Amino acid sequence: MEGLSTEAAAARLREEGPNELPRAGQRSLLRILVEVLREPMLALLLLGGIAYLLLGDRAEALILLAFATFSVVVTVVQETRTEHVLEALRDLSAPRALVLRDGVRVRIPGREVVCGDLIVLEQGDRIAADAILLEAADLQTDESLLTGESLPVGKTASGPDSTDAARRPGGEGQPFVYSGSLVTRGSGVGRVLATGPRSEIGRIGQSLATLDTDAPRLRRETARLVAWCGIGGGVIAALVVLLYGLLRGGWIEAALAGIAIGMSMLPEEFPVVLTVFLAMGAWRVGKVGVLTRRAAAIEALGSATVLCTDKTGTLTENRMSVARLWLPSGDTIRVRGDDAVPPDYHALIETAALASAVEPSDPMEVALHAARAQVPASGRGGTVAHAYALRPELLAMSNIWDDGEQLALCAKGAPEAIATLCRLAPADAASMAAAVEAMAAEGIRVLAVANATPSDRNWAATQHDYAYALAGLVGLADPLRTSVPAAVAECRAAGIRVVMITGDYAATARAIANQAGIAAGDVLTGADLASLDDAALAARLRSVTVFARIMPEQKLRIVQAFKADGEIVAMTGDGVNDAPSLKAAHIGIAMGKRGTDVAREASAIVLLDDDFGSIVRSVRLGRQIYDNIRKAMAFIFAVHVPIAGLALLPLFFGLPILFGPIHIALLEMVIDPVCALVFEAEPAEGDVMRRPPRAPDEPLFSLPMIAWSVFQGCLAFAMLATVFLVETWSGMPEAELRALIFFALIAEIVALVLVNRAFSAALGTALVRHNMALRYIAAAILGVTGVILFAPWAQALLKFGSIAWSDMAFAVALGIALLLALESCKPRLRGIARAASRPARTRGGAT
């Protein structure tokens, strides 16, 4: 074989382009930065900080600008990392290649391989392009990156009709090899059929390039609310300035009043809370062995309704081991761990190992050699004198061993192939078939084993020419991860439907699903799925719990079908074939240890320890984080009502301005850390994993939550307004009244914090519930209060008069009264409070 000439290869390279994925659509760092800065939430954070700088409040401005800068940096880093998906694919699909050029073997960069090249394949090579085999000697390739299945598949040289056959990764006896696959055994020569974006891995890359991840729902809702609040606050502030100036004639006082109103209604806490909660959430999730690549995934975790998981390596350990042994006599045993195997089965194990490669790379052969190491050595062996490779027409392989005295032939393969070699009687064949079916129903992969004694060293042309005797059956299993059943059970208790998507056979998949505790349901194969249109698939989705014999593009279709049905979809995976569905899912979850770079880069979450149980812990934390975000948002709604009301109240009654910008800024210095730290550190509710997921379309700012929050704020304002008006008409000096109302407002803010810590817990529980951040904030509030009370310069700065201890006790009593009043309202408003804290999913549900 000569291969292409150097000139012809160069011409084709110019015509077809390099053997790599195109870089179209890659965003530069500057473009990513511009897109991030166009986000309304970040823009308002920056504008808020600039506004405070113009007001001269440097502390508040620096806090806002620091949060804005942090958010921008984190977002840019995360977005830049997502651009690595195609880079990882490109590196994987274009390794160096050994090709025939002008009749000479030369090793060239993978990107220079062209269609028509003759590519030489050897054990350990990463295949550079899709090709059809012209020669194959005991060739096996690992195509798990494309199929998701861990077992290597045997390859054969092409026949006359091979070019017309359908090309699909996976399956024994194919003459096609694929870019990105690994040669695990043997050697061969192939003619290149497709390179770059036209290869199987290239098509996956193209589908990744056209997929967009969903915009974070919380960010959209928060940006919209902040925009409306900002517009509303600006309009009201402008009207206050206008009316105050026209009616009272003091335009400087009007400007101060407008600034105070604007600051009291400026909702900068909303984006700050979201930024801090998601950043801290990523840190907390990381402590349980989960890397969060996109903060929005934490939001989605708490609302996941469907978890689509692959089988190999996710539910199972991706490690084959001998599980069952069967003898022709009908005797059978189940092999468990390191338990001793009875002597009657030693010959079966040894024969199976001798029928394998001497230095195995195939997981099944590795398992057979490991099993042989656990039984006493018989002395059989020597060197392999001759071998018969796996063939499409006979799925069995044999090794002839020569120990210097006698020859021994050991064979293993598909049960039907070994039955043919052994020329079994119908009754014996039926007995073996029944044993095979029993093992397959348990999710066990079955190999039949046979042996023979060659009469001489004139090796027969085929394995059919020897007189084989059946040694028995060896069942190999990829064991279920020990943490999986408990994790699946907890998912089901939390209302999350677990669905298996695998390329394995239906019987094996159903058996593994049963072991994992996945709910009983229909099994839908890839062939059946291909015959369904979108409407028919949507109708079947709700009854199917196992998808078997699924191709990569079908995984993506399944995820998209679930999303179209209104589900919040989490998808696990580790191979290149999983990357499109990982990116398309609301929460893509990649395996960190064995997962490919492509899968990790396409995902939103990476399990660093590959522990399926970490998914459940992440869901728990996701729900806790979402609950705490709602608590903080409810508090923000409630606390701004009395602040804005007290800023507006004097204007309606023609009284002097009570609070100016400095007072509002000081209150914000209390409110901001409470929102960002105290509620973020709140422990999970007791039923966090015993309630169904929230409805996917449930708004963050639901009407019940807003109603409950506004009620709290209105009650607090009513109490403060009553005191303000009564004391004003009683003749209390303005400076002393300002101090009294300010400290009473602080007390009521603390009361609102305690009320919103938990909607279901009793008052006593809320008071003693562990939260170190709350203790620190409370200590800081007491410290600032002490400074104001005992430092004359602080009183002068705030325009406070001296306040009697009786007035301070009265201010604290107002806070206690508000706390008791709201707690007493909880039983009467239980429905509103429950809806405010835990919106329930109204459709679908787990099976």
Image (spheres, rainbow, N blue to C red):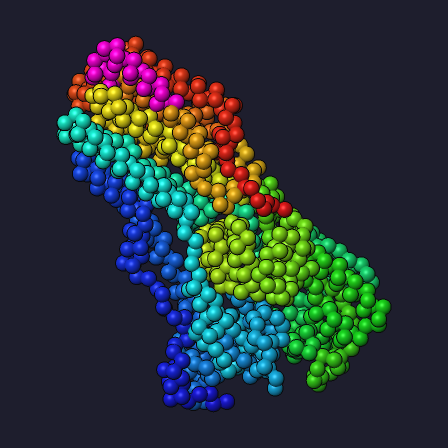
Where residue 656 appears, as percent x and y from the top left, is 20, 21
Q: In this view, does 623 lie to the left or right of 70?
A: right
Residue found at x 69% / y 59%: 507
Q: What stretch is highlighted in magenta?
A: 715-739
Q: Does 803 appear above or below 235? A: above
Where residue 685 appears, as percent x and y from the top left, is 50, 33
Dividing the picture into quarters, in which one does residue 14 lie? bottom left
Residue 73 in sight in this render: no
Quick one: 656 or 399, which is closer to the camera?
656
Where residue 367 appears, as percent x and y from the top left, is 63, 61
Residue found at x 54% / y 75%: 177
Dividing the picture into quarters, in which one does residue 682 lie? top left
Dividing the picture into quarters, in which one does residue 358 lie? bottom right
Q: Does 672 appear above or below 378? A: above
Number of on-image labels: 0
Q: Does 756 appear above or below 502? A: above
Where residue 68 appears, as percent x and y from the top left, is 28, 44
